[in-house]
Image: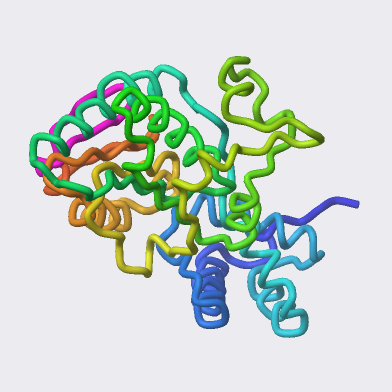
Amino acid sequence: MISVSVQEQTPLGLEQGFLELLLEKLYKQTCYDFREYKRTSIERRINRRLRATRTKSYREYSQYLDSNPEEYNLLFKDLTINVTEFFRDAEAWEIFRDIILPNIISRRDSFDRGDTPIRLWSAGCSTGQEAFSAAILFYELMEQHSNRSDFEIIATDIDKDCLAVACKGLLPTKAVAGMHREIIDTYFEQNEFHSIRPSIQEHIHFKQHDLVLDDPLTEMDCILCRNVAIYFTRELQERLFTKFYHSLRRGGYLFLGKAESLYGQIGEKFTPVNTKWKIYQKQ
């Protein structure tokens, strides 16, 4: 049997109109807003649900949602991108460890902030590997300063199921593949799963947060948001980066993914620290 694509069934312009109505419907039903995500990514992922439900157009799929409300959660899962790993892009993390973290600690001490902890936001944390990576490096460095309790990481994601996994700190063996043996032995308890030691977990607070709709966190010394904004339109990226600007303390750092960049007026408010790995400092 010859398969027929969505575009072959309905004129492209009309089908795009149904796509916009579908995203509006998803927002009204779930309060998750994907209306300003890049269309190429959105279409690819929704079309996956069309194949799974054997519907042939966005209009037919919308009707399917009316009859099968449990499909909303499956659609949400396909629209959210949950790809993460420990110390992704090792060179970038070396810069974070050797330059960014020492500067954050030095600035905090020079401004005499007393008992105010260093605050880091891992935005779009998925199942937590990025937040755990940052916490391990923080812990090692703060140990040199004889104060391991002086930092906190707020790790947020839109997907509550991913957060539930992250909160447990339990990771399959494949998740730590490629990490240095010393790190595994020092910071993980190894049984059937690898679990993050409590001394690391106690510094991380996971919470549900929508980067598009929710107010940003505040008083941050550093924000990690890597490979999240690449799925947003340029206009949505600019609004997100403006939120991050207001989240950061003066001199705070923004750590983006390799394919992401600051530009326009908001880009002028940051100083590039490393252009290859897209690390910026708030002026």
Image quadrant occupied by the C terminus: top left
For the point 70% across and 84% down, which residue is it?
Answer: 66
Relative to the observer, which residue lies in front, 123 or 257? Answer: 123
Residue found at the very far front of the displayed protein: 146
Q: Position of residue 167 (x, y in %)?
A: 59, 53
For the point 91% across and 52% down, which residue is it?
Answer: 1
**Where, by quadrant of the figure, is residue 49 drawn?**
bottom right
| Range shown magenta | 268-283
Q: How is the image coloured?
A: rainbow
Residue 109 visible within the image? yes
**Where, by quadrant of the figure, is residue 185 drawn?**
top right
Q: Position of residue 103 (x, y in %)?
A: 20, 28
**Where, by quadrant of the figure, is residue 257 drawn?**
top left
Relative to the observer, which residue lies in front, 150 or 223? Answer: 150
Is residue 180 left or right of 240 when viewed as pictured? Answer: right
Residue 271 magenta: yes
For the point 23% across and 38% down, which residue is it?
Answer: 253
Q: Position of residue 208 (x, y in %)?
A: 49, 64
For the point 22% across and 54% down, which residue is it?
Answer: 219
